[in-house]
Image (cartoon, rainbow, N blue to C red):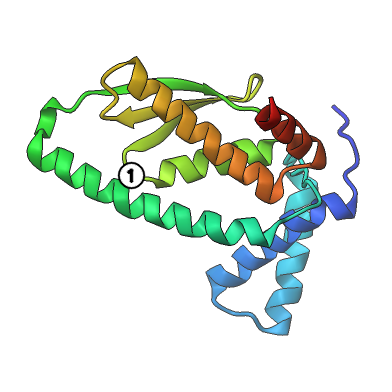
């Protein structure tokens, strides 16, 4: 099976990441190791097919900084909530798996949204339906449809913030139209 040729511009983020991982694993950022790591990265990228990561071509630092602060606050708050649930309710805590359809079909944004949600204690992505961009989230303390709706809203709000940070112009435009409606 023949595969589509990927441009260096599309492949560059992968090559840089592979080079960084190689040098970090060896804990050696010397010129020789950088050169050999670059060679290994190119060989890996050419021999083992990985779909290219389509970047939106934009990154908004002014939105990324408050996002990071909000994320850290959510991690701390959720940690205390999980502590309370573990101590107060123990094994009687009710949880559920909730399907959350996302707006974006970008692998990067679906993955980023899933990782951000999974890093917050009390929620975990258990399945991703790539064809429909749906995340299936296991949420702790989801007792009723209102709690499920709240979890869905939190996930979609996280996705919206990520779109504002690094989504394509089309995704940002669609998000702005959705907010205006």
Vertical comparison of 158 with 58: above or below? above
Pick whichever, 76 or 129, lies toward us.
Answer: 76
Q: Position of residue 113 (x, y in %)?
A: 55, 40
Name the residue furthest front.
180
Residue 170 visible in the picture:
yes
Q: Position of residue 134 (x, y in %)?
A: 56, 23
Q: Quadrant of the C terminus?
A: top right
Residue at x 37% of width, y 36% of height: 123
Vertical comparison of 1 with 10: above or below? above
Q: Residues within 10 Å of mark 1 (few under 14, many from 20)?
A: some
Name the residue furthest top.
145
Where residue 37 sits, quadrant-wise, is bottom right
Pick whichever, 127 or 152, lies toward us.
Answer: 152
Label 1 belongs to which residue?
A: 121
Vertical comparison of 49 with 134: above or below? below
Residue 105 visible in the picture:
no
Where residue 9 sits, quadrant-wise, is bottom right
Q: Say whether residue 78 is left or right of residue 129.
A: left
Q: Quadrant of the N terminus?
A: top right
Residue at x 70% of width, y 33% of height: 175
Q: Say whether residue 64 is left or right of residue 123.
A: right
Residue at x 26% of width, y 20% of height: 143
Q: Say whether residue 80 is left or right of residue 44.
A: left
Q: Position of residue 119 (x, y in %)?
A: 42, 47
């Amino acid at each position: 099976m023949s595969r589509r040729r990927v441009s260096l511009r599309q492949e560059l983020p992968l090559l840089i990441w592979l080079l960084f991982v190689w040098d970090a694993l060896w804990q050696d950022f010397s010129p020789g190791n950088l050169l050999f790591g670059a060679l290994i990265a190119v060989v890996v990228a050419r021999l083992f097919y990985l779909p290219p990561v389509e970047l939106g071509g934009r990154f908004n630092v002014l939105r990324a900084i408050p996002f990071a602060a909000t994320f850290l606050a959510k991690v701390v708050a959720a940690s205390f909530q999980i502590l309370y649930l573990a101590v107060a309710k123990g094994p009687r805590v009710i949880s559920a798996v909730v399907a959350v359809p996302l707006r974006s079909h970008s692998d990067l944004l679906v993955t980023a949204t899933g990782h951000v949600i999974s890093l917050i204690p009390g929620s975990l992505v258990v399945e991703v339906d790539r064809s429909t961009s749906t995340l299936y989230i296991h949420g702790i303390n989801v007792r009723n449809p209102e709690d499920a709706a709240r979890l869905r809203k939190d996930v979609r709000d996280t996705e919206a913030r990520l779109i504002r940070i690094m989504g394509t112009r089309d995704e940002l435009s669609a998000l702005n139209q959705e907010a205006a409606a």
